[in-house]
Image: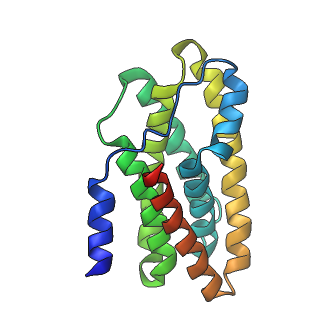
Amino acid sequence: MKKALALALLMIALPAFAHPGHDSNPLQDGLLHPLTGLDHLLMLLGTGVLAALTGRTLSLPLATLSAMFGGAVLGHLFGDLVGVETLITLSLVVAAGALLLPSRQMLLALVMPVFALFHGWAHGVEATPSAFWVFSAGFVSVSALLLVAGFGVGCLLRRHSKLQQLFGGGLLAGAAFVLAG
C-alpha cells in the first residue's frame, strides 16, 4: 500500500521545471547540462546500467540516445509539452523499479528510450532557437558518455544483486530529490 501511495504522489506532483534556458554559451551549456541536471544524469546512468544488466550492449543506449535527440528536435519544432517534467521524473522511477524488480528488468529497460524522448523534448524547448544545433551537439555527446559510464557500472553490478538494489534505491531517492527541487 505504501509503495502504491508513493507512486501515486509522484504521478500527481507538480512539475520540477528543472530545465532553464541556455543562452550564454550553447555548446558549454549543452556539454554541462547532462552533468548538472540531476534528472538527466540519473536517467542516463540508470539506462546504461540496465543495458549492461539485460545484455543490451549497444541497442538500448543507441535507442535511448536517438530517442533523446529525436525528442529534442520535436521540442524545438513544436514547443512545450504538458506533463513533460512529470514524465522525466517518472523515467527515474521506472529505471529504479527495473533495478529493484529484477523479474521486470527487461520490460522496464525497453521503455527507457520512450522516456528519453521526453528528456530530449524538454531540451528542445529550453534551447535558444538560434543555438539549438550547437546546444544539442553538446548534450548528445555528453549523454553518450554517461550511457557508456552507466554501462560500465552495470557490468560491475552484474555480480552483486545487493548493489543493484542500492543503485535502484539511489535512483528512487534521486527522483524524490528532483520532485522536491
Instruction: Check the picture and name the quadrant holding the N terminus.
Output: bottom left
User: In the displayed structure, would residue 144 be above or below residue 108?
Assistant: above
**Residue at x-position 65% and y-position 65%:** 57
The location of residue 122, given as percent across then percent down, is 45, 35
**Residue at x-position 36% and y-position 44%:** 15
The location of residue 17, given as percent across then percent down, is 43, 38
User: In the displayed structure, would residue 48 be above or below residue 135?
Assistant: below
**Residue at x-position 58% and y-position 63%:** 46
The location of residue 36, given as percent across then percent down, is 65, 44
Q: Is residue 97 left or right of residue 134?
A: left
Q: Answer yes or no: is residue 49 visible.
A: yes
Question: Residue 31 is drawn in which quadrant?
Answer: top right
The location of residue 171, given as percent across then percent down, is 54, 66
**Residue at x-position 49% and y-position 44%:** 67
Question: Residue 69 is drawn in which quadrant?
Answer: top right
Q: Residue furthest top?
A: 130
Q: Answer yes or no: is residue 71 visible.
A: no
Q: Is residue 141 left or right of residue 110?
A: right
42 or 17: which is nearer to us?
17
Q: Residue furthest front?
A: 180
99 or 57: which is nearer to us?
99
